[in-house]
Image (cartoon, helix red, strand yellow):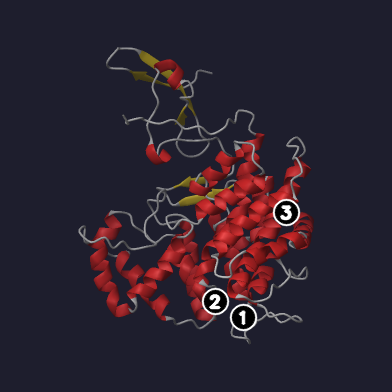
Amino acid sequence: MQKNTITLTNNNTGETYEYNILEATRGPSVVDIRTFFKDTGMFTFDPGYTSTASCESKITFIDGGKGELRYRSFPIEDLATEHTYLETCFLLLNSRLPTKEELTDFDLEIRHRAFLHEGLRHLFNAFPDNAHPMATLSASVTALATFYNDHLDMEHEEEYLEMAHRIISKIPTIAAFAYRHSIGTPFIQPDIDLGFTENFLTMMRAYPGGKMHLSPNGHDKIKEVEIRAMDTIFTLHADHEQNASTTVVRNVASTGAHPYVAISSGISALWGRAHGGANESVIAQLEYIGSVENVEAFIKRAKDPNDNFRLMGFGHRVYKNFDPRAKILKGLQDELKAELNLDSELMAIASKIEEIALNDEYFVSRKLYPNIDFYSGVILTALQIPKSMFTPIFVIGRTVGWITQWIEFKQDKTSKIARPRQLYTGD
């Protein structure tokens, strides 16, 4: 069968170069320019990789124009509403949804692997009690490599799946411990009688002694709607194609570094306010706006090209339509508001901003729709999650995506160490 090709012409020399077009099963095809430098003596120039496919992947598909997101071909809407986070984890790792028996076995394994080595638990004492949980989380995941430094044989599926299950199960425990260390309260050990998401919320909220699954105010038990909401947030964050932190994980993987070191690098990349830290910035901005009466003035500032103020939580590097994850969280926010009788000032401010922006020509013409960060920050606040834990919760959800991407990279026989080139303009 004849391959589709593209021909490039150097207008200075008249030379032509032909390159194969690699067809995608979904989305844009790509031009295979692996021999471009050898052929032409030139590099391509693409700051931020806006038009560059860095790898071949079968994990996640995004169509930003249509507002479409799929894991292993499954629409995110179906996974977030009809399946649990652990089912989504199994899907990403195994390319299919689990049977009932497989899900039971997977769930039990994750519960039993949630405990930390005592040496790692004592490591928290070395961190300042005012350390941001993301810094503690990143350092602790790197330290995991010292406790599990065995060589991985990528020819044996059970070895890398064991490694993946271990990191997925331990990240919520490390995140909860990092938070409790930051506020000076005793650690709550994992409870094997609880499922993944309820266990995390319990380790965050509970007080020592007995089955007291309490929130910080001392009397509210964790509600089913709260567990479902957090589980949905984990699912929506599970993977997102070749974003900044995933690219970091793959690049570190290309050096042959330990997988947990690669994950730690991804955590550090995610911390940035332009990436995973954005939902924390959304809440900070809502608090800064202060009241519903101030919204219109800040909207006016956001539209003023001479004002440095930018509205957080709107627009996305990939989505030029409504972020499908944001649509799901919008519905979830409304459900929480009704079931938990929420009527906070922050939620009112967010709703007013949303109402104006979705009907304002300035935002609509620029395709500046609310993104996942706009809604997730408000929902996490409603779930009594402090701002410092917003990004660690993102980490918990994204860990399965990072480790799945790491596995896919390692299994790719054509993979090479990451080595971008540059346009040198110095002396």
Amino acid at pointer 2? Gln
Viewer-closest of 155 and 93: 155
| Residue 420 rendering spot, x and y as whole percentages | 47, 32
Q: What residue is rendered at 50% in x and 35% in y?
A: 54
Q: Which residue is mark 3?
A: 166
| Residue 162 rendering spot, x and y as whole percentages | 76, 49
Labels 1 and 3 touching (C-beta < 8 A): no
Q: Helix, strand or loop at disc 1?
A: loop
- Packing grade of label 1 (10 A; few <14, some 14-19, many >=20) is some
| Residue 34 rendering spot, x and y as whole percentages | 49, 24
* First in sequence: mark 2 vs mark 1: 1
- Packing grade of label 2 (10 A; few <14, some 14-19, many >=20) is few
Q: What residue is rendered at 32% in x and 31% in y?
A: 426
Q: Which residue is mark 1?
A: 215
Q: Helix, strand or loop at disc 3?
A: helix
Labels 2 and 1 touching (C-beta < 8 A): yes
Q: CA distance from mark 1 to mark 3?
A: 27 Å
Asked if 211 appears above or below 173 in the picture, the reply is below
Quadrant where the N terminus lies? Answer: top right
Residue 52 in view (yes/no):
yes
Residue 330 in view (yes/no):
no
Q: Helix, strand or loop at disc 2?
A: loop
Left/right placement of residue 67 relative to residue 229 reads left
Q: CA distance from mark 2 to mark 3?
A: 28 Å
Quadrant where the C terminus lies? Answer: top left
Q: CA distance from mark 2 to mark 1?
A: 8 Å
* First in sequence: mark 1 vs mark 3: 3
Q: Which residue is mark 2?
A: 384
Asked if 192 appears above or below 397 in the picture, the reply is below
Left/right placement of residue 412 relative to residue 147 reads left
Viewer-closest of 355 and 184: 184
